[in-house]
Image (cartoon, rainbow, N blue to C red):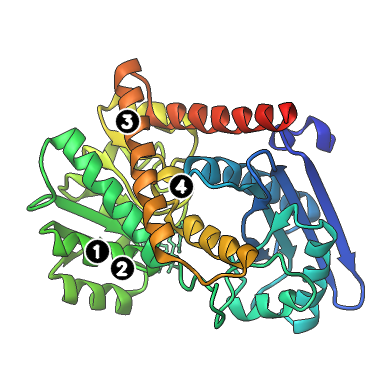
Amino acid sequence: MTLFDSPSFEGHEGVHAFSDEKSGLKTIIAVHSTARGPAAGGCRMWPYPDAEAALEDALRLSRAMSFKNAMADLDLGGGKAVIIGDARAQKTPALFEAFGACVDQLGGRYWTAEDVGVSPADLTHARKRTRYVAGLEGHPAASGDPSPVTAEGVFRGVRLCVQRALGRDLDGVRIAIQGVGHVGGYLADKLHAAGAKLILTDVNAEQLHAVAARTESKVVAPGAIFDVDCDVFAPCALGGAINAETLPRIKARVIAGGANNQLADAETGRALFNHGMLYAPDYVINGGGIINVAGEIRALEAGEAFDPAWVDAKLDRLAKTLEEVLDRALAEHRPTNEVATEIAKARITIAAEKRAAA
Ligand code: NAD
């Protein structure tokens, strides 16, 4: 199969492969859409087995960023960069400087930020060669750790889904959280403060017990989280938590959490729906992080300081978008993931048409 026939390539405006012999950089920057504004999405460093696997990941992730940015109502398109390499062994300042130069060659069509394997410190080196970098630290426009904002968006989304599916507020609702890292930990604090009863798991025992102690929660082994009696299941670890094996075990009426790519595939969304479960599409409910980054891009472009009030207003708007997805899914008797994809695509198409007409 050639690149142009690949289903993942569909809809992409451009895919850019760069290498730099001196630093050893090999990077692919995929720009899915700039219809709503410059493409924005993080840079992932991962030891991909080959360039094909790296390309596939870049394409899949950049498309997902278009959808996420559209659903967060940001004036941003979708893009993603991947660097082929082992983040634990192959990072150097020169590598990230060379990466910055590649980003700069796109002339502002793509803004980069952190993702798996890339830290704010790495981005400082990229920034020496391009201004199209967000997620830095220590300047007035800096947005800082996005996790608390992501968790706040997820919290609002869980509350909404509980109101819709169970007709009650969070007080006394039993919520199972898989993964209490950055997002899951902050989410646990917020849910505990709202009176929810939490059951937690994490593969990191130390972190698990610390979060459980401060939120007066029960803990279970990682494999047991799918079997607990609960009203809400909140995936906040890695992708693919909801699949053909785990779905029949989950007793919750609501699935709503911060993780990316929660469903193994789109059919799992339909299976959830057939089981009578309400699913908050992941790239809608977890849009708080990219909203925070967008706040930094906005501030950098305007030469202003970061404005938390702008971020908060966008989070309110995100909750409205989730409501729109739930309303439409209910009215049309369809899975929420299918409705969300349709709305995201429509928002991108409208922006593209407006741009073409201008
Ligand atoms: P993190 O690494 O801080 O937390 C993930 C936690 O999950 C860790 O504590 C890890 O030990 C745990 N974990 C991993 N595998 C597990 C398993 N099988 N069972 C139980 N626990 C397991 O990452 P994070 O920043 O909190 O992100 C969590 C998820 O949310 C990821 O899918 C990420 O892509 C997504 N996300 C994060 C943000 C953000 O702002 N950080 C924004 C949007 C989406």
Q: Give the crowd class for mark 4: few <14, some 14-19, many >=20 residues within 10 Å.
A: some
Q: CA distance from mark 2 to mark 1?
A: 5 Å
Tag 4: residue type? Gly
Q: Give the crowd class for mark 2: few <14, some 14-19, many >=20 residues within 10 Å.
A: many
Looking at this view, is 356 or 122 the one in front?
356
Residue at the far left in the pictured view: 172
Q: Secondary structure at mark 2?
A: helix
Q: Residue 226's spot in the image, x, y percent? A: 27, 49
Can residue 262 be seen? no
Which label was assigned to residue 240? 4
Residue positioned 44% across, 41% down in the render? 263
Tag 3: residue type? Leu
Looking at this view, is 44 or 267 the one in front?
44
Residue positioned 21% across, 37% down in the render? 253
Q: Which residue is denoted by mark 3 in the rendering?
A: 326
Vertical placement of 258 versus 338: above or below? below
Q: Which residue is denoted by mark 1 in the rendering?
A: 188
Mark 2 Cβ and ligand 1 under 8 Å apart? yes
Q: CA distance from mark 3 to mark 4?
A: 22 Å
